[in-house]
Every structure is written in C-alpha cells, then in structure tokens.
Amino acid sequence: ETGVTQSPTHLIKTRGQQVTLRCSSQSGHNTVSWYQQALGQGPQFIFQYYREEENGRGNFPPRFSGLQFPNYSSELNVNALELDDSALYLCASSRGGLAGRETQYFGPGTRLLVL
Amino acid sequence: QKEVEQDPGPLSVPEGAIVSLNCTYSNSAFQYFMWYRQYSRKGPELLMYTYSSGNKEDGRFTAQVDKSSKYISLFIRDSQPSDSATYLCGQNRDDKIIFGKGTRLHILP
C-alpha cells in the first residue's frame, strides 16, 4: 500500500508570487485534507476535498485554493504569497464516509519559505 | 479558550521512564481523538486513535480519554531515545482535525 506523497519537498518563493503544491493520496482513499503548520505550532486546517468537491474550509483567505482530481490526488494553490505563508504544508488522506470518525494519514509535507 | 490545549514542553525524561502527555479540549460534542508523533522536519505519524471514554493500549503506548474532565492522555512505557519527538493531540470535528500545539519530548539516554 502506497502512503501519502507530496511534492516538492522544499520551495523558496518571493512575496507576491504564486505557488502550487501537490499531493497523492494513499491507495483506497478518496478524501484529502490540507493543513498549514507554522514553526512551533500544531497543524491548522485549510480545507478538505471529498470526491473532487470542497468539503469544509478553515479560517484561511480565498487566495488559498485547491483542486482534487479524479484519481483523488490534489493541489493546493496559494496566490499573492505573504511572508507569513512560510510554513510546512501537510496533506492528509482518509477513506471518507465515516463522518467525524475518519483517521487521517499525513504525507511528509512541503516546506515553503517566502522571502 | 483554545479548542485543544497542550503544554508545548520541552519535557525531558530519562530512558526507561513512563511518560505522560496530556491535552484538554473544550468542545464535548466531538469524541474522536488521536495522537500523532512528529519527528523534526517530517510529517505527523498516527500513533493511536480513541473514541469516547476509556483506555486503548498498543504496545508501549496507552491512550486515555476522560470525558468528565475533558482530558486526553498518552502514556509511553519503557521510553526509548527513539521516542524523542513532538507529540500532537487532535480532536476530529466533522473530519477537520483540531490540533494542540504539540509537546516536545526528549528521552535522555
């Protein structure tokens, strides 16, 4: 069984630029969630995709957007990057269908630095 | 009040000791909890999940939920240097996990 993979592993961007991060979900999983983890903090929920539809969003501005593809892989796009967007971005996948009792499995993350 | 609170540590204990990690939560409507272990610069790795009250044991790890006090705990027996990591507690709220800040644990050889 293949685990959750993310690309790239590291990324450096400048303020105002746009970035796309990618995630491949674990085999058999149809739900992908994205989290932002600032240094020294716990992960913060950005949004979730279930069967290609957005299924819940955290307290993040619209410049954070996403997509899920028919193979359940997903992208996170961030426009107009700000210095505070520097963080570890985590993708987690789950089976879907057990509302409130899903176990999420995380990928290794993409570390984004905005200069 | 934060939704899930966790002492960030660091917590240093000698090898072989029993480690107790704790979190409190504010919303009792959601009763699915999990513990993740995160090594430096890595993604969180699921350790255990529990539903509602009681204990759950897996090897050297025991997870405990006390609904009356809104307290969740993780115990690690016979701690090893390889257990040195950040431990994150989380509450599943409609498939959105609310995490604590994480507790940094150091096991001293």
Image: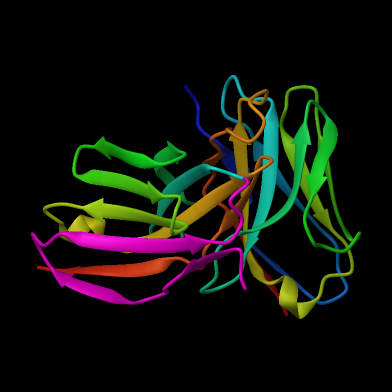
On screen, residue A80 versus residue B37, left or right, reads right
Residue B26 on image: x %, y % = 58, 61
Residue under the point 42% across and 39% down = B50
Residue B102 image offset from top left, x and y in percent: 45, 65
Report the residue at 81% width, 76% height from top: A82
When the figure is inspected, residue B73 is found, relative to residue A95, above or below; the finding is below
Q: Is residue B93 visible?
A: yes
Residue B19 counted in the magenta span:
yes
What residue span does the magenta drawing correspond to? B1-29
In the image, residue B61 lies in the stretch drawn in magenta: no
Above or below, A25 against A115 in this view is above
Q: Residue sitting at 51 percent across and 68 percent down?
A: B5
Whole-percent x and y of residue B36? 43, 50
On screen, residue A104 versus residue A78, left or right, reads left
In this view, the residue in front, A15 or A88, is A88
Q: Position of residue B10 (x, y in %)?
A: 33, 77
Q: Residue furthest front?
A: B68
Residue B61 located left or right of residue A101: left
- Work out whether residue B42 can be spotted: no
Left or right: residue B61 versus residue A85 is: left
